[in-house]
Image (cartoon, helix red, strand yellow):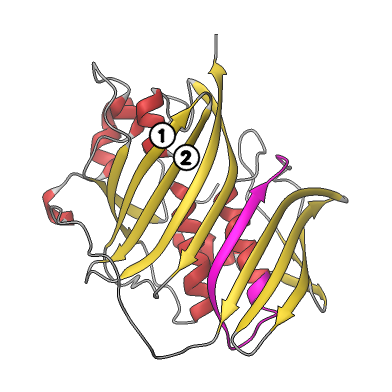
């Protein structure tokens, strides 16, 4: 499983097997499932390696099948357009010829022009809130010590994370605000920066849905990521804390939609991300 920032960065070291084909490996998990955040980061890296000198500005992803973490994933990139300012790529991820994932990614040139954004929410700073490890200490022995595991990012929740919310008498509103900081150094390479943002954006986004649905990443409901979209606006400053403001505008039936805005601590808007998840009936 991914436990360090070095593990995340190693995911991005894809093997090129053709002009527009790459292979990436996945760390194994107890149930051998492939993690969506890892595929998102690798797919963006594969597309970006075919558009040198251009910056990622959006990627739209559909997760079609589960896959097996014990097998490598092949990423086939199809160039759709190379214009004066925009390059478009399709990425197909497969294992043994079975398609697991499809994405459309777009890259652009660096241009100085209008620069406007919405303001970062006014929240307590990271030093004023408890770390995730402290909040999950009472649940340390659940699910084979899953909760206190080492993570690539230090996380400090301004709102109750799903496992804590599960014990509240009433479900909280579907909003989570989290301070995050990389536990290590991320290179200045713009593509790597965007890929780590892609990985980070998928880690916790559906948790704001989970708090209202009374579930967590490990149950009692089974969850599956359906799709994920990211719009990249500015580079993330991984030398400092980042604020991820997440909320759900709609939860209907077994589907929950989540939207998140990621900010540098200085207030710069890094990206906007959306995800839809599917939540199966509760386990008996």
Q: Nearer the viewer, residue 249 or 180?
A: 249
Q: Is residue 267 magenta?
A: no
Residue drawn at point x = 36 percent, y = 27 percent: 212
Q: Earlier in the sequence, mark 1 or mark 2?
A: 1
Q: Callout 1: helix, strand or loop?
A: helix
Q: How many marks?
A: 2
x and y, in percent, of residue 30 in the image: 61, 35
Mark 1 and 2 residues: CB-CB less than 8 Å, in contact? yes
x and y, in percent, of residue 36 in the image: 59, 48
Badge 2, how many Cα within 10 Å: few under 14, some, many 20+? many
Badge 1, how many Cα within 10 Å: few under 14, some, many 20+? many
Query: Which labelled disc corresponds to residue 209?
Result: 1
Residue drawn at point x = 27 percent, y = 26 percent: 138
Magenta residue span = 47-66
- Tell me if 36 is positioned left or right of 71 in this view: left
Q: Callout 2: helix, strand or loop?
A: strand
Residue drawn at point x = 29 percent, y = 33 percent: 136
Query: Which labelled disc corresponds to residue 257?
Result: 2
Tag in front: 1 or 2:
2
Task: For residue 147, say whether it is visible.
Answer: no
x and y, in percent, of residue 41 in the image: 58, 61
Q: Where is residue 85, by image quadrant? A: bottom right
């Amino acid at each position: 499983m991914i436990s360090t920032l070095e593990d995340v960065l190693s995911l991005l070291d894809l093997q090129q097997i053709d002009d527009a084909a790459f292979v990436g490996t996945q760390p194994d998990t107890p149930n051998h499932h492939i993690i969506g955040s890892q595929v998102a980061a690798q797919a963006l890296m594969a597309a970006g390696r075919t558009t040198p000198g251009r910056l990622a500005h959006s990627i739209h992803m559909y997760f079609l099948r589960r896959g097996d973490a014990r097998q490598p994933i092949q990423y086939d990139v199809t160039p759709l357009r190379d214009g004066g300012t925009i390059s478009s790529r399709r990425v197909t991820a497969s294992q043994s010829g079975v398609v697991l994932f499809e994405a459309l990614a777009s890259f652009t040139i660096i241009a100085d022009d209008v620069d406007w954004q919405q303001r970062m929410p006014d929240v307590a700073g990271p030093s004023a809130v408890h770390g995730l490890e402290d909040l999950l200490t009472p649940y340390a022995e659940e699910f084979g010590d899953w909760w206190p595991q080492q993570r690539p990012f230090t996380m400090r929740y301004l709102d109750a994370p799903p496992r804590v919310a599960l014990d509240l008498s009433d479900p909280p509103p579907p909003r989570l605000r989290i301070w995050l900081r990389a536990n290590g150094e991320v290179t200045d390479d713009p593509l790597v920066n965007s890929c780590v943002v892609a990985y980070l954006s998928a880690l916790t986004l559906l948790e704001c849905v989970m708090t209202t649905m009374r579930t967590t990443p490990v149950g009692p409901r089974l969850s599956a990521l359906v799709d994920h979209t990211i719009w990249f606006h500015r580079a993330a400053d991984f030398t400092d804390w980042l604020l991820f403001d997440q909320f759900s505008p709609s939860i209907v039936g077994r589907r929950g939609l989540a939207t998140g805005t990621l900010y540098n601590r200085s207030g710069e808007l890094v990206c906007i991300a959306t995800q839809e998840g599917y939540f199966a009936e509760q386990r008996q």
